[in-house]
Amino acid sequence: MLSTALKNLPQTVTFPPVWIPDPIVWDNFREAIQTIPFFTYFKNTAFYVVFSIVGTLISCPFVAYGLSMVRWPARDSLLLLILATMMIPFPVTMVPLFIIFGKLGWINTYAPLIVPTFFGTPFFIFLLRQFFMTIPPALPDAARIDGASELTIFARVILPLCKPALGVVALFQFLASWNNFMGPLIYLMEESKYPLSLGLQDYRSTYFVEWNLFMAASTIVVVPTVIIFFIFQRRLIEGIHLTGVKE
C-alpha cells in the first residue's frame, strides 16, 4: 500500500510490479487530500466514532454488570440469548433493519449507526462480563452490607476496577466504527455525510482507478489506527488477558 502510494500513475500498472518507486512521489499525499473532500469525511468519521464509543461505554458495562454481579432468575438464559444473536449474519438483518430505520425517518442520518450502540453490543457485553466475573464477590457484597445501592456499587466499586477492560472495548469499538463500510453504504445517501471508509471510493470511477491516490489516502486513513494501537498496546493485551483468565 505504501509503495503504491509513492508511485506515479504509470508505475501502478507496470508488470512486473515496481516495489521501490522511482521517482518517489510524495506529492500524492497532498493531491489525495485535495482531490476529495477529505476533511469533511474525516469530520464525519470523528463524529461517528466518538458517539459510538460513548454509546458502547454507557450501555455495555450496565448490561454486563447485571449479567455477572447481580443474582436474578433467568440470568444465564438471557446471556445465552444475547450470545446467540452474535451468530446471526448481518445480511439476514440488513433488510429488516433498513425498513425499520426508514419508518423512523433515520435513513441518510447517522442514527442507524450510532443509536444501536446505546443498546449494547453482544461481544462487548460478553467481554466485560468475563472481566466482572474475575472481581471477588466480597467487594460488592461488602458494599451492599454498608447500604450501597446497585447503582452506587456499579459506579464506585466496579467501574474503577475495570478500566483495562473498558479500554479494550473502546479500542475495539473505535476500530469497528473507523473501518465500517457496509453500514454507511446502506444508510447514508448524501456524499457530504460519508465517512472516510466510504469516501475513499471517490477515487474509483466506472472505467478508471487512480491507484496511487487511492493508496495514498488509504495510508493516511490507516495511520490513526496504527498509532492508537501502539499507544494502547500494553493496555489492550492486559485487558484481553484479564477478561480471559479467572483466578
Image: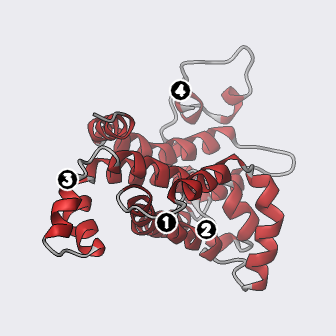
SS at badge 2 = helix
The alpha-carbon separation of the residues under discs 3 and 4 comes to 66 Å
Secondary structure beneath dot 3 equals helix
Q: Amino acid at mark 4?
A: Pro
Mark 4–mark 2 Cα distance, whole angstroms, equals 42 Å
Q: Viewer-proximal residue, 214 or 27?
A: 214
| CA–CA distance in space, label 1 to label 4 | 42 Å
Sequence order check, earlier mark of 1 and 4: 4
Q: Amino acid at mark 3?
A: Ala
The disc labelled 1 sits on which kind of residue?
Answer: Ser
Q: Nearer the viewer, mark 4 or mark 2?
A: 2
Q: Nearer the viewer, mark 3 or mark 1?
A: 3
The residue positioned 68% from the left and 29% from the top of the image is: 12
Estimate how packed mark 1 is, as few (under 14), some (14 to 19) or many (20 or more) residues with alpha carbons within 10 Å.
many
First reached walking from the N terminus: tag 2 or tag 1: 1
Mark 4 = which residue? 23
Q: Helix, strand, or loop for circle 1?
A: helix
Residue 203 vertical position relative to residue 73 in the rendered view, above or below: above
